[in-house]
Image (cartoon, grey):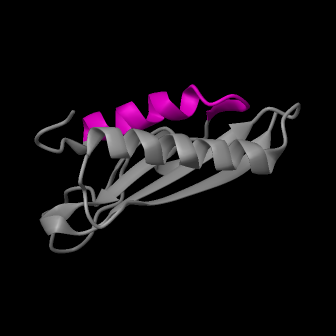
């Protein structure tokens, strides 16, 4: 269990979880990952607004607010895309429940399949 929430560690753990889902080829990196930059917001001192690892981005959770997890992945063509997306979302939600027991409000998890191989 993660006592103090380290977004980088949480993001890495969720990325590993996504990679274990049957039908997932790989997480899809965002352009910012490819360029080595992360989005920033005014008032944050130039710090990134979220932490991402390849196709997983974790935001929120500050001050008791909800966590937001965005997953972008590429699925294997042999599997139904909808089934892969649902399985990835379920796996991330279960892993979050294990890592952040009693976390309220519950995390918002979205999964987007960007392609297939």
One can see residue 18 in this view? yes
The residue most toward the front is: 102
Query: Of residues 16 and 8, which is closer to you in this image?
Result: 16
Residue drawn 84% across and 43% down? Answer: 80
* Residue range (magenta): 8-26
Residue drawn 57% across and 25% down? Answer: 20
Q: Viewed as shown, does residue 30 lie left or right of 97?
A: right
Say which quadrant the C terminus sits in. Answer: top right
Residue drawn 41% across and 39% down? Answer: 95
Q: Viewed as shown, does residue 62 lie left or right of 88?
A: left
Q: Is residue 32 above or below residue 74?
A: below
Residue drawn 48% across and 31% down? Answer: 17
Q: Is residue 56 above or below residue 104?
A: above
Q: Is residue 11 magenta?
A: yes
Q: Is residue 42 magenta?
A: no
The residue most toward the right is: 78
Q: Position of residue 6 (x, y in %)?
A: 19, 41
Q: Viewed as shown, does residue 104 lie left or right of 57?
A: left
Say which quadrant the N terminus sits in. Answer: top left
Q: Position of residue 94 (x, y in %)?
A: 45, 42
Secondary structure predominantly adopted by residues drawn in magenta: helix
Q: Position of residue 37 (x, y in %)?
A: 37, 48
**Residue 48, quarter of the rendered image:** bottom left
**Residue 115, quarter of the rendered image:** top right
Q: Position of residue 2 (x, y in %)?
A: 19, 36
One can see residue 36 in this view? no
Labels in figure, total = 0
**Residue 63, quarter of the rendered image:** bottom left
């Amino acid at each position: 269990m993660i006592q103090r929430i380290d977004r980088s560690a949480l993001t890495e753990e969720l990325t590993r979880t996504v990679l274990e889902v049957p039908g997932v080829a790989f997480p899809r990196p965002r352009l910012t990952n490819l360029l080595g930059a992360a989005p920033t917001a005014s008032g944050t001192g130039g710090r990134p607004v979220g932490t991402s690892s390849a196709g997983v981005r974790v935001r929120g959770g500050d001050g008791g607010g909800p966590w937001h997890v965005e997953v972008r992945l590429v699925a294997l063509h042999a599997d139904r895309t909808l089934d892969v997306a649902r399985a990835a979302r379920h796996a991330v939600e279960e892993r979050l429940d294990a890592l952040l027991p009693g976390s309220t409000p519950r995390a918002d998890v979205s999964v987007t399949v960007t392609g297939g191989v």
